[in-house]
Structure formats: C-alpha cells, structure tokens
C-alpha cells in the first residue's frame, strides 16, 4: 500500500502544500478501521468514533488554515544541514547495532524520522517536477525511496521488540509532526504564514495527532496487525468485565490497566534478552504467546 500511495502523495504535493498532505495521511487509519470492521467484524467503539471525528476535524481545519502552496525552497547549506541532521538521527539505531546495542524506543523514533526525511524529499520531488527538472526529481525520488526503506527496516525491527500498540503511534506522530515543524526552515510553505501566526493550524494538527494516536492503539486496528496484536486486542476486550460501557469498550481506567499489564508482560523478554541483530526475533515471544492462545 505504501508503494501505491507514494505516487499519489507526489501528485497531491503538486497541488496542495506539505502541511496539508502529510497530516492527511491519517485518513489511511480510517480505511484500516473500515477494513477491520468488514473483514474481522471488529466494530469500533465510542473511543474509536471520537478518534475518527478528531482526525476528520483536524484534516478539515488544516486544509482551511494552511498557507499557499509554493515550489520554492531553500538551497545550499540550510537544506543540506537540516536533511543531514535528520538523516543522521534516523540512522542512530543502526550505529547502535554496530556497537552491539539495540534500543527499542530509539528504533521507533528513528523509523518515524526516516519517514519524515522521505516526506521532505517527496516534497522536493514535486517541486522539481513542477519546474520540469526531471533529473533532479529522479534523484530526490531515489533519496525518498531510500529513506522509506530505512524507515521500514527500523519499524520492522521495533515491531519485533515492542507491540504494535506502542510502535504505530510513535512512528505516525514523528513522520507527521517533524516535516510540518521543519517546513519553515527549508520550505516557503511555512505554517507561520497562516492566520494568527500558525497557532490555529498547530492546534488542528495536535487534534489530528491525538485522534490518530488513539485510533492506532485501538483493538479494531490491532486485530489487523498480526497474531500477537490480535491476541492483545482480544484480551483488551475480554479482560475487564466490570465498568464496560454500552459500546462494548472498557472504560478508560480498566483499559489502561489491561493495556499496561499486557504490555509489561510482553516487553519484559525484549528487555531482559540479548538481541544479536536489530531484526532478530525477541527471545521468548513464541513461548510466551503460546500459553495465551491455549487459555
């Protein structure tokens, strides 16, 4: 889906600014929510519906307040410095692995930063294509693809050490928030040029991110992520029998308690075991998961 969506992202950037296109990627979570309901009969609860409303309101607000699109951007030292620092931050987990260390939280953040680098490069692809600079567009496109591959490797590594309920929100927030915040430094589509110096725009972005983070942690989307996440989603629905609201979703206190206990149990092997590579399976995951399925 990422490979199919990237050309559409370039087309969108030919018409609307990055501050609209990047947050609008949250719409993909709504598609996954619909797929979960149709394919797995995972009906969204009240929390998921509120998250959907937050995402829609955020996207609409951002579209209304965003600055005008432009194909101009900075050149020279400023562009090189920003992209170099961002790329170096995304490569930190690989350097840590080379030194014999694997830090899951750092890997999650680095995945989002790599995707953010790819988003900025994709914007530069669209700018070059708008000016018929096709060789430049191809070079930036190759750089964007490389950054996305790095992000994908980091994300897959993080998913082997942490549950998707932790990884997905961090990656999404980083790849959405970072490009928008860096836009004033390298693009002329600065959110500071929007009404009230960008304060309403940033508020809409925060509303969207809150909704997307909530939706990414919902059982309805976890059920699409794989066997471990389906098991976690099932436990999140079934464990609290007291304080269940009419929608079938546990109230926030019970849900937080169930989530914390389950994630603690799953995170312990990853922290206690020694990983040989960042892509190695977490020791003990299969053994821990099997008894849960028998129960």
Image: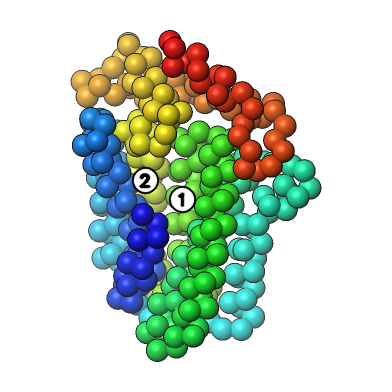
Viewer-nearest residue: 176 or 288: 288
Residue pictured at 48% horizontal, 56% vertical: 175
Left or right relative to 45: residue 118: right
Report the residue marked by disc 1: 173
- Secondary structure type for disc 2: helix
Residue 194 in view here? no
Residue lying at 36% horizontally and 68% vertically, measured from the top left: 7
Could you say whether the residue bearing mark 1 is in a helix, strand or loop?
A: helix
Q: Is label 2 in contact with label 1 (beta carbons under 8 Å)?
A: yes
- Disc 2 crowd rating (10 Å Cα; few below 14, some 14-19, many 20+) is many
Q: Classify the position of the N terminus by image quarter.
A: bottom left
Residue under label 2: 212
Please give the name of the residue rendered at 51% of the width and 60% of the height, measured from the top-left corner. Answer: 148
Q: Which quadrant holds residue 65?
A: bottom left
Question: Do we see residue 162 in this rendering?
Answer: yes
Snapshot quadrant of residue 132? bottom left
Tell me: residue 255, above or below residue 55. above
């Amino acid at each position: 889906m990422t490979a199919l969506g990237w050309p559409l992202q370039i087309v969108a950037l030919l018409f609307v600014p990055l501050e609209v296109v990047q947050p609008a990627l949250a719409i993909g979570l709504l598609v996954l929510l619909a797929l979960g309901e149709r394919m797995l009969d995972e009906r969204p609860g009240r929390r998921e519906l509120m998250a959907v409303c937050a995402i829609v309101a955020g996207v609409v607000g951002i579209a209304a307040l965003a600055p005008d699109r432009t194909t101009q951007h900075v050149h020279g030292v400023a562009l090189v410095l920003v992209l170099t620092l961002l790329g170096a931050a995304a490569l930190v987990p690989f350097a840590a692995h080379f030194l014999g260390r694997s830090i899951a939280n750092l890997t999650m953040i680095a995945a989002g930063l790599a995707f953010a680098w790819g988003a900025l490069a994709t914007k530069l692809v669209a700018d070059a294509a708008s000016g018929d600079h096709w060789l430049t567009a191809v070079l930036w496109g190759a750089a964007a693809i490389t950054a996305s591959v790095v992000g994908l490797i980091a994300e897959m590594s993080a998913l082997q050490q942490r549950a998707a309920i932790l990884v997905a929100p961090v990656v999404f927030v980083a790849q959405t928030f970072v490009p928008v915040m860096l836009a004033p430094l390298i693009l002329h589509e600065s959110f500071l040029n929007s009404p009230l110096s960008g304060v309403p725009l940033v508020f809409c972005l925060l509303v969207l991110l809150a909704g997307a983070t909530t939706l990414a942690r919902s059982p309805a989307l976890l059920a699409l992520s794989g066997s471990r996440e389906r098991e976690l989603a099932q436990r999140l629905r079934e464990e609290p029998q007291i304080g269940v609201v009419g929608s079938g979703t546990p109230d926030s206190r019970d849900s937080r308690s169930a989530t914390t206990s389950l994630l603690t149990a799953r995170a312990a092997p990853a922290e206690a075991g020694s990983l040989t590579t960042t892509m190695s399976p977490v020791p003990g995951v299969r053994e821990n998961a099997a008894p849960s399925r028998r129960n």
